[in-house]
């Protein structure tokens, strides 16, 4: 079992890591600014769901396969890069709307939730990071390492939910102000597309 000291130490580090700028932070920020705080929270929930998959992978040892197999790592990162290019294409094609015409279809909660999951699961660095990070806080002397790993994963998800939730709320409010202007909307869509393309390039050229 995890001790209180281990839990507190791990949670503090997890919060700091979640606050560090990275692809997931930018993804939440841009989606929240485009569609509002509520939409951003669905993206956050999707990202956290993806973290469950990475936690389970490390707990059962599957992440070790991606650490050892260059082919598996390459396939996963290219799939993630392709999805980010798809999001960029959608952002560049989006039309501005100031409320004087029929509003374009909003993204459904399910679509935003799936975006978060795909964004997280197709980032092989997350699995490799969990594989290197989580075991440092486990010990066979405290019982099942797999159970301890799952507990640490849940703490990391909680930290991510708190930090990314704040990002979604603040960037969503900022985005609501920008979307009152047609010019600002065009700038926001182009900025989102540029961010997604940048993340795609970074992921595509990522090395283990």
Image: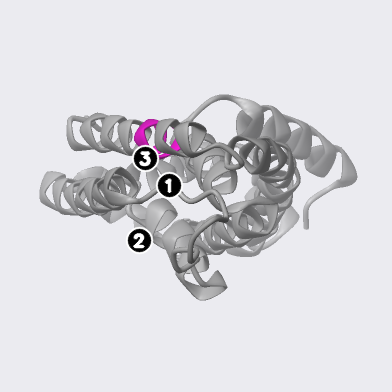
The correct choice, above or below, for 27 with respect to 114 in the image is above
The picture quadrant where one finds residue 13 is: top right
Q: Residues within 10 Å of mark 3 (few under 14, many from 20)?
A: many
The correct choice, above or below, for 105 with respect to 202 in the image is below
Image location of residue 156, percent across then percent down = 66, 47
Residue bearing mark 1 = 96
Q: How crowded is mark 2: few (under 14 residues within 10 Å), some or many (20 or more)?
A: some
Residue bearing mark 3 = 125
CA gap, disc 3 and disc 2: 14 Å
Image location of residue 205, percent across then percent down = 18, 30
Residue span colored magenta: 188-192
CA gap, disc 1 and disc 3: 35 Å
Q: Which residue is drawn at 73% across and 37% down?
A: 170
Label pair 1/3, CB-CB below 8 angstroms: no
Q: What element carries label 2?
A: loop
Q: Which of marks 1 and 2 is in front?
A: 1
The correct choice, above or below, for 71 with respect to 12 in the image is below
Q: Nearer the viewer, mark 3 or mark 2?
A: 3
């Amino acid at each position: 079992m995890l001790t209180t000291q281990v839990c507190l130490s791990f949670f503090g580090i997890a919060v700091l890591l979640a606050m560090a700028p990275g692809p997931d932070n930018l993804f939440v920020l841009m989606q929240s600014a485009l569609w509002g705080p509520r939409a951003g929270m669905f993206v956050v929930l999707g990202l956290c769901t993806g973290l469950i998959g990475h936690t389970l992978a490390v707990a059962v040892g599957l992440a070790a396969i991606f650490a050892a197999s260059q082919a598996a790592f390459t396939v996963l990162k290219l799939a993630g890069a392709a999805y980010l290019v798809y999001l960029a294409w959608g952002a560049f094609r989006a039309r501005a709307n100031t409320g004087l015409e029929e509003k374009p279809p909003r993204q459904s909660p399910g679509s935003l939730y799936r975006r978060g999951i795909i964004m997280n699961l197709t980032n092989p660095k997350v699995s490799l990071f969990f594989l290197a990070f989580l075991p440092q806080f486990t010990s066979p002397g405290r019982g099942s390492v797999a159970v301890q790993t799952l507990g640490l994963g849940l703490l990391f998800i909680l930290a991510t939910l708190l930090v990314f939730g704040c990002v979604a709320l603040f960037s969503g409010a900022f985005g609501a102000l920008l979307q009152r202007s047609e010019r600002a909307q065009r700038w926001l869509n182009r900025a989102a597309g540029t961010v997604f393309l940048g993340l795609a390039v970074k992921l595509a050229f990522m090395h283990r």
